[in-house]
Amino acid sequence: MSTGTEPSTETTAVAEPADRRTRVLDLVGLLARLFLGAVLVYAGAVKIGHPVTAQRAVQAYEVLPTGLANTVGLALPWVEVVLGVLLLLGLFTRPVAVVSTLLMAAFVVGIAQAWARGLTIDCGCFGGGGQIGAADTTYPQEIGRDAVFALAGAWLWWRPRTLASLDRVLFGS
């Protein structure tokens, strides 16, 4: 005899695939969050101890006035680390994903314009930067790599809910 409190077979059959789909999407979000977060922390950390090199990397793009390029070169590594740590923690995931995606898009545009203008530079994405030989440029790979990073950010922008995040603990999302 049924008490009416047990879920019906129909409801359970429908709920299980939806629950499984949600868990899979949450896992994909976790992987995207950890991937992009780790990349940003690493990219910033390798540049923080080398401010002159970071400034030279930004100057090499020949887009910003020298003073502004120097400021960006000094600030960017710290911004990358902060964004990366927030992603690793899963804190403020959507706003951080928006900023990270836009940052990656800016990197893609910056590399593409350098390539289109015939500049021969190292992107400086993971340290280094500045002038290099024409045969040493890897613009297509750099653009592709940063596009993948931007896609991870776009995923989190679209669906910020992930497993093991402080957002879930603090805000229930």
Image (cartoon, rainbow, N blue to C red):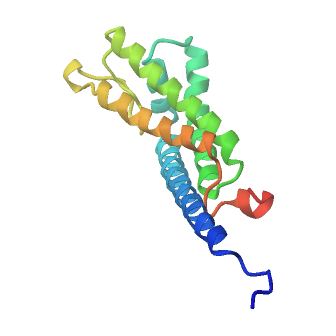
* Residue 150 visible in image: yes
How many numbered markers are drawn?
0
Pinpoint residue 87: horizontal percent, then vertical percent: 61, 50
Q: Which quarter of the rendered picture does the N terminus lie within?
A: bottom right
Pinpoint residue 74: horizontal percent, then vertical percent: 58, 32
Query: Of 25 and 36, which appears nearest the observer?
Result: 25
Pinpoint residue 106: horizontal percent, then vertical percent: 52, 24
Residue extending farthest to the bottom is 1
Q: Is residue 117 left or right of residue 150?
A: left
Pinpoint residue 166: horizontal percent, then vertical percent: 70, 60
What residue sits 51% from the left and 31% below the top?
Answer: 104
* Residue 55 visible in image: no
Q: Is residue 92 left or right of residue 83?
A: right
Query: Of 150 and 43, which appears nearest the observer?
Result: 150
Quadrant of the rendered structure where residue 76 is?
top right
Quadrant of the rendered structure where residue 125 is?
top left
Q: Up-down: is 5 above or below 45?
A: below
Query: Of 32 and 24, which appears nearest the observer?
Result: 24
Residue extending farthest to the top is 117
What residue sits 55% from the left and 63% below the top?
Answer: 17
Q: Is residue 88 left or right of residue 128?
A: right
Residue extending farthest to the front is 1
Q: Which quarter of the rendered picture does the C terminus lie within?
A: bottom right
What residue sits 63% from the left and 74% below the top?
Answer: 9
Q: Up-down: is 96 above or below 22?
A: above
